[in-house]
Amino acid sequence: MNFRQLPNREALHLLFSSHRLKKLDLSCFFVQDGETFSANVPYALPHLKEIIDICTGGEFTYCFPTSPDNTEIHLQTKKHMEDECNSLLHMLSKDPQPDLQSFVMTKIITISKFALQQLIQVSTNLTEIHTLLDCIDLNVLVNCKMLRILRLHTSPETSFRSCPRELIKTWGNVLPSLENLEIFTFCNDYFVMRPVIAIALDHCPKLTSVGHFDSSRAIECIEAKVNKSHTGYFNLKKCFWGNETVCKVACQPCQPRNSQSAQSFHSVCTRNERQNLQSSFPELINTAVSRCPFVEELSLQVLHKDCLQHLRRLKRLNSLVLECAYCDDLDVDECFSSLGEIRHQLKHFVIKRIDLLNTDRRFPLNVVIDNCENLETLGVLELTAINLPLRTNTRFRRLKRISIEMKFDGLGQILRYCDNLTYLLLFGHYMINESELQENLSHISALKLQTLRIQSRFFPKMP
């Protein structure tokens, strides 16, 4: 959108004023627009009618086409994009925006922090902010009493090796004001922001998720305090536990983004230190479970098999992702035995890298079905075979979603048993082989799928 080329800029201002804007998305998603792209024009402008249609719906998303190869943004395009975003921010910040509830801007561009601060100040009913950390003055968030979702990115230039003290102090002043906050996350720098997440858990009673951050370590920080400000339960419902510990055990840098930041966020563990981390892991999970009894969705790095028994106390757990790359002495039967009665309430179950030496490297799918009678979603990662034959079991018909490897030996039989599937994800380690796909098409075509996805890699996540 180019304000300077529109015939009446005041008319556009009137347009935004008359239609109550509820969502402003300045993410600048780069899309290929074959009809409007010209080799002589580095960007294309939407028609005014399109803008009217968007604003009438209460939502404005700023999109930008790129060059055909979709690999490079011309400097002229980037400068134009920044100018237009800033013009829009300045325009909107002049008037109260009581209906603006959502602001999204995640791309790294040069933006007027003053204009953004003014917009947030006049938008008293904001419930969601998703933006770059260095684009926002954190102190302005104190007035966002209705804020429920806060997602922040750090750019490669401003990523931290450790959380600066002044930043911790600022968050200590801001977070106590955000009593309605439900989701708070840094979309990178998961590990260095541990002190900030601990502050959020302490002061935001409605918090249900801290994103992919390892909240078990933040809880450990809170427990270590002599004078605890929060002694009750946390309201977290979606958790990722063990990620930070795995990063240390693996002796790899956490979330490297460039050559400078990829040096090391953690010193390399000695063998004894690694063993100590693994042996103390069950107690870490025990503490996390004690303080977070309302967890419904959990992704757990299993560093010690004894940690699984503590999950029995999560009476609301219905979604479980287990990553077992660093636990060599656990098999599937033992896994479900440790989970106890909660295995019967699981509706979504994903398992990755589990020791199959006792089952001839074949995944015992019968065991999963026998133990999880209410299972609707199954993900089997980095495992390529099942124990055959599968037993006839009506519980297979409960499965609605499966994520599994393309080369999985026995995939055809699984699909014959699971005839009520609505979602199927097939993935391979590298490139999808057409012949492999053809082998499974006959089974797939017999299903009444609503969604079929085929991709070269799969990353475990919550259903």
Image (cartoon, rainbow, N blue to C red):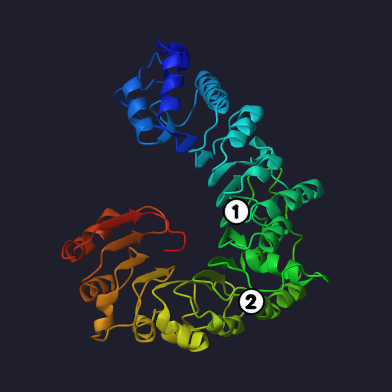
Q: Is residue 322 left or right of residue 143?
A: left
Residue picked out by circle 2 = 285
Q: Position of residue 367 (x, y in %)?
A: 38, 85
Residue plotted at (61% across, 84% down): 306
Q: Position of residue 145 (x, y in %)?
A: 61, 48
Front-lying residue, 370 or 439: 370
Query: Residue 251's quadrant in the figure?
Result: bottom right
Given this view, does label 2 or label 1 mark the residue nearer the observer? 1
Residue picked out by circle 1 = 185
Which quarter of the rendered picture does the C terminus lie within? bottom left
Query: Residue 371's quadrant in the figure?
Result: bottom left
Front-lying residue, 166 or 11: 11
Q: Position of residue 408 (x, y in %)?
A: 33, 69
Q: Is residue 345 left or right of residue 311?
A: left
Q: Position of residue 328 (x, y in %)?
A: 57, 79
Is residue 233 visible to the viewer in this orientation of the structure? yes
| Residue type at tag 2 | Ile
